[in-house]
Each structure stands twice: as structure tokens, then as C-alpha cells.
Image: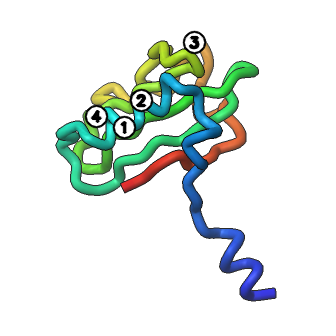
Amino acid sequence: MLLFLFNSCQKTEMPANENPDCLNKKIIEYKNSDLPCETGKSIYRYTFQGKYVYVFNPGDCGADMMSDVFDEDCNRICGLGGIAGNLMCNGENFWEEATDEILIWEE
């Protein structure tokens, strides 16, 4: 039972073939970019407003950094966080409405 609980808490990355093609290209660009943070960089998929969206988190080295949110067609729909601490995306509080968090990539 303890082994089951330990394994169920581990984060796993979603296989690239389950992402839209444009997103796979964006992930490669993101991984290869010169992001200022050395830790905490990640990409998560959520269900938001009935669609999959992808949150690109630049890391945890600055409180004023924004996480960009993209739809399945790689259109930027909002930015979360930043110096103002924005929580809103398309008129809704993203963190209250987003569900089904899946890790795509982290470093």
C-alpha cells in the first residue's frame, strides 16, 4: 500500500505525441530559450473553459514573472502572475476554474 501511495504522487511528463504539433514546437523553443530562472521552469496542461490550455511557467527566480497561457492552437490567451499577481484569464479566475492538471515538462 505504501508503495502505491509513493508511486501515485510522482510527477510524470506527458508524451510529446499527445500534444498538438504547434505545441511540441513551442515546447522545444521554450526548453532551448535563455530563460532567466535556473529552477522551477515548467509547462502544465489544464482544462479551462471547456478546452485544453497550456501554462508556460518561466521559473521561480522572480515574483514579477508572468506565466503565459496558450490554447491548443498555440494562441496566447492570457498571462498569469506578474508584478500585479494576475489571476484572471478570459474573464475568469484561472486557478479557481482550471482542472485536470497534467505535467508536460519541468526543469
Label disc, if present, on residue 14 of the rendered structure? none
Q: Which residue is mark 2?
A: 25
Which residue lies most toward the bottom here?
A: 2
Residue ID at (81%, 87%): 1
Q: Which residue is mark 1?
A: 28
Q: Is residue 85 above or below residue 101?
A: above
Q: Is residue 18 above or below residue 84?
A: below
Quadrant assignment, res 34: top left
Quadrant assignment, res 100: top right
Q: Amino acid at mark 4?
A: Met
**Could you tell me if the residues under marks 3 and 1 are in contact, i.e. CB atoms within 8 Å?**
no
Pinpoint residue 10: horizontal percent, then vertical percent. 60, 68
User: Is the residue marked by circle 4 packed among few (<14), some (14-19), or many (20+) residues within 10 Å?
Assistant: many
Is disc 2 placed on a helix, strand or loop? helix
Is disc 1 placed on a helix, strand or loop? helix
Label disc, if present, on residue 90 of the rendered structure? 3
CA separation in Å, label 3 and label 1: 26 Å
Pinpoint residue 55: horizontal percent, then vertical percent. 49, 33
Residue ID at (62%, 18%): 92
Q: Which residue is mark 4?
A: 65
Residue ID at (76%, 80%): 4
Q: Is residue 74 above or below residue 3?
A: above
